[in-house]
Amino acid sequence: MIPFRTKKTFAHGVHPPENKNDTSRMPIRQFPFAPVMIVPLSQHIGKPARSLVQEGQEVMRGQKIAEADGFVSVAMHAPASGIIKRIGLAPSASGKMIESIYIAPFPSSSQEINEGQPCNIDTATPDEIITAIQQAGIVGLGGAAFPTHVKLKIPDDKWVDTLIINGAECEPYLTTDHRVMLEQQQDLFTGIRYILKATGAKRAIIGVENNKIDAAESLRANLPVGEPLSVEVVPAKYPQGAEKMLITALLGREVPSGGLPADAHVVVVNVATAAEIGRLLPTGRGIQERVITITGPGVKDRGNYLIPIGTPLRFALETAGLTDNVSRIFLGGPMMGQAITSIDVPITKGTSGFVVMTENETRRIPEKVMPCIHCAYCLDACPLFLNPSHLGILAKFSEYEQMASEYNLMDCFECGACTYVCPSNIPLVQYFRVAKGILREKKAAA
């Protein structure tokens, strides 16, 4: 057994029910193709991709159908061989209509994946690896969907010595990363080699929570000989998977307020993202599918599935089967995920899973928001030592500038721990998201 080290953690945090047993031991299964796939041109933070196809055109699975439009943008690839039915607006989980490419897969196609120009790890330069990652359309698969090549392009005035592979997966219900660590180890190790070369980091650490001991033990048993790679186990605690918290837990370093992991000489990459790099770059393929957890009390056939990107959520839910008393569906987990109002949206690169809740899980007592009783539970929960209670009061009176200038609002990464522990049912993290959005709009307007 791997030794359990209680010191490898961070202060504060919460322990919500994990609810991972339903899918943690279920192997990854291939999901069927939907009759129509919807590929949004904006599935990432940054500028949307630019379409390369026309209506009526035939495409091959894995073919590039949209190119990156600038540095903070990535390419898009066909999730299936088929015909472009139309190019137009489609609904998204954010509520916005997004320019998208509609593809009708060929029913009789073998759906072989189109290959491109391989990126040879032995001869490629760091810049060539970063370009290959952008061309493969890879973004952060942990949920943030930040273009991975941008993260790996270390600024000239900074340097990193350590690569952390984030296998914590602290979000309740989700087991995507767990299965990737068990079933896609060679892709993961190959991806780590690419990332080490791209960033110049001298070592890599795979951080795994102690509720996934089987994955940690398997990874340690199969570590490539001679590689500067190790596996470290950390206590299961939310939000252990936040990159700032994992840096503190594994290295004892602190990312400065307003700073990035590179300011602590670290780069953090999600374990599924690293595995995709190792899977795609050697063949020059683009990302056209990803592993997703479909789970929750409202799902009949729960599991971990390899699902084509662009699969309509309605089709995925109907295929998995739902119970009669579904109340709410979260894209992502219940802590940091987004409760959606429509299932007529496509699965995107940033969709790590969806959790279907029934009325039994979403009933809240009392139903209304109560006044803050100054219990300080939220202060004890916040991993960044912010004052969520006071921030919430300032948000109520629209004092957004004061929230940022005096109470470090922008350091909040919206983990939801404060909302989870609040006995008054105050939706603190929702207040903070609104405040940050308004501040960003004002800054952009200025």
Image (tube, rainbow, N blue to C red):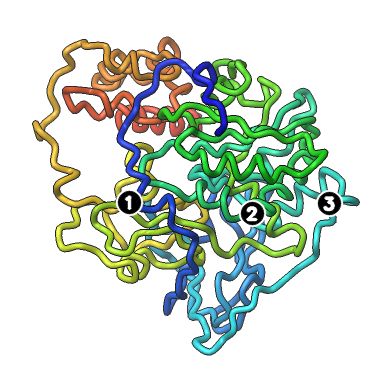
Please state which of residues 162 and 209 is positioned toward the viewer in this rendering.
209
Alpha-carbon distance for marks 1 and 3? 38 Å
- According to the picture, the residue beneath numbered tag 2 turns out to be 276
- Seen from the viewer's position, the closer of residues 218 and 260 is 218
Whole-percent x and y of residue 176? 48, 50
| Residue 111 marker | none
Horizontal side of residue 263 vs 360, given as left or right: right
Q: In the rendering, which numbered label is found on residue 355?
A: 1
Q: Position of residue 352 (x, y in %)?
A: 46, 50
Residue at position x 44%, y 76% from top? 36
Q: Nearer the viewer, residue 155 or 98?
A: 155
Q: Which residue is mark 3?
A: 121
Q: Amino acid at mark 3?
A: Ile
Name the residue rendered at 29%, 52% in the picture: 296
Asked which quadrant contains residue 324, the reply is bottom left
Mark 1 surroundings: few (<14), some (14-19) or many (≥20) residues within 10 A = many
